[in-house]
Image (cartoon, grey):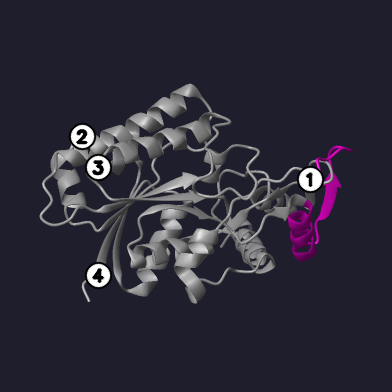
């Protein structure tokens, strides 16, 4: 069987984990472009041609994330537009590579509850607006087939964002105290990085196109996550504020994804994912 060629356009936690996983399957040739290689792609037509004309899939994640300012927003849009401009100048010997765009569940806004892929989009900040606009750019061009993956928050040992939830709680647990806001009753989706890369590979194997939500099966409260981390690490839990919003739920439906995969995908239990992540972080902190 001829291996599929995958180009990860942008390095980072997801691209690195995806590359490592795909290489274990012996069915893929994977190249992850770091920042300097991304910049070279945008100015060197021969380099771009060498990469794309042989690729079957391009996993696009390059850009500044989270997007916090107008400059971040504009630069991220320009990056995608420049990629499309360069790609449109290439001659492909066979079919064009499928773009797998790693979007975010942030496109549904802060008040989304069980959002479906056709639910209204509601930008709440520069980050969500950036993904909405990038999706639109890709929809307006009709040259490349595109798969849009609207992904919930990811946790794993290589996370660098320290976002509120599993990643921050795990980092805090290494110092002994987990800090949560209020009662921690707010519900959110959180997906283990190892599950995400298996999901992306399944989409690749099925040559899926269109838009899919990607998340764990059900939202979980921050308090439940903190308690799992505490039970594994022995850390204590500190509530920073007396008030909490027990009614606040943000979640997305993964019914469409599950219908596509059937029993081919089995989610890692939250406790196991957190346990593996904690001990990986602990090992990294201890050093060689």
- 4 and 3 marks in contact (CB < 8 Å): no
Q: Position of residue 50 (x, y in %)?
A: 16, 50
Comparing 8 with 136, the one in front is 136
The residue under the point 40% across, 45% down is 61
- 1 and 2 marks in contact (CB < 8 Å): no
The residue under the point 83% across, 51% down is 237
Q: Position of residue 261 (x, y in %)?
A: 46, 69
- Please tell me how crowded label 2 is: few (under 14), some (14-19), or many (20+) other residues with Cα within 10 Å: few
Front tag of 1 and 4: 4
In this rendering, position of residue 192 left or right of residue 238: left
Q: Which mark is residue 200?
A: none
Front tag of 2 and 3: 3
Instruction: Report the residue that reaches farthest toward the top.
Output: 70
Mark 1, residue position: 179
| Range of magenta residues | 223-245
Comparing 167 with 79, the one in front is 79
- Please tell me how crowded label 1 is: few (under 14), some (14-19), or many (20+) other residues with Cα within 10 Å: many
Q: Which mark is residue 142?
A: 3
**Element type where label 1 sits in the image:** strand
Mark 4, residue position: 3
Q: Which mark is residue 43?
A: 2
The residue under the point 26% across, 65% down is 4
For the N terminus, give its image quadrant.
Answer: bottom left
């Amino acid at each position: 069987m001829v291996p599929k060629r995958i180009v990860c356009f942008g390095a980072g936690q997801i691209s690195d984990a995806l590359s490592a996983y795909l290489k274990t399957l012996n069915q893929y040739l994977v190249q992850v472009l770091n920042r300097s290689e991304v910049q070279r792609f945008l100015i060197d037509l021969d380099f771009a041609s060498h990469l794309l004309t042989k690729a079957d899939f391009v996993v696009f994640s390059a850009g500044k994330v989270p997007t916090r300012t107008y400059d971040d927003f504009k630069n991220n849009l320009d990056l995608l537009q420049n990629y499309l401009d360069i790609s449109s100048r290439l001659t492909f010997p066979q079919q064009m590579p499928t773009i797998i765009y790693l979007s975010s569940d942030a496109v549904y806004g802060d008040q989304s509850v069980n959002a479906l892929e056709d639910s209204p989009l509601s930008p709440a900040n520069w980050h969500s607006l950036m993904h909405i606009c990038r999706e639109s750019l890709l929809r307006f061009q009709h040259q490349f087939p595109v798969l849009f993956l609207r992904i919930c928050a990811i946790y794993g040992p290589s996370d660098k964002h320290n976002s509120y939830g599993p990643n921050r709680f795990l980092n805090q647990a290494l110092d002994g105290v987990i800090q949560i806001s209020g009662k921690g009753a707010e519900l959110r989706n959180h997906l283990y990085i190892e599950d995400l890369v298996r999901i992306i590979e399944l989409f690749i194997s099925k040559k899926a196109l269109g838009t899919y939500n990607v998340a764990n099966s059900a939202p979980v409260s921050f308090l439940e996550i903190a308690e799992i981390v505490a039970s594994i690490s022995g850390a204590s839990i500190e509530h920073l504020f007396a008030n909490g919003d027990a009614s606040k739920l943000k979640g997305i439906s993964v019914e469409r994804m599950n219908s596509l995969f059937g029993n081919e995908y089995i989610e890692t239990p939250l406790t196991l994912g957190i346990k593996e992540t904690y001990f990986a972080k602990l090992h990294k902190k201890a050093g060689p």
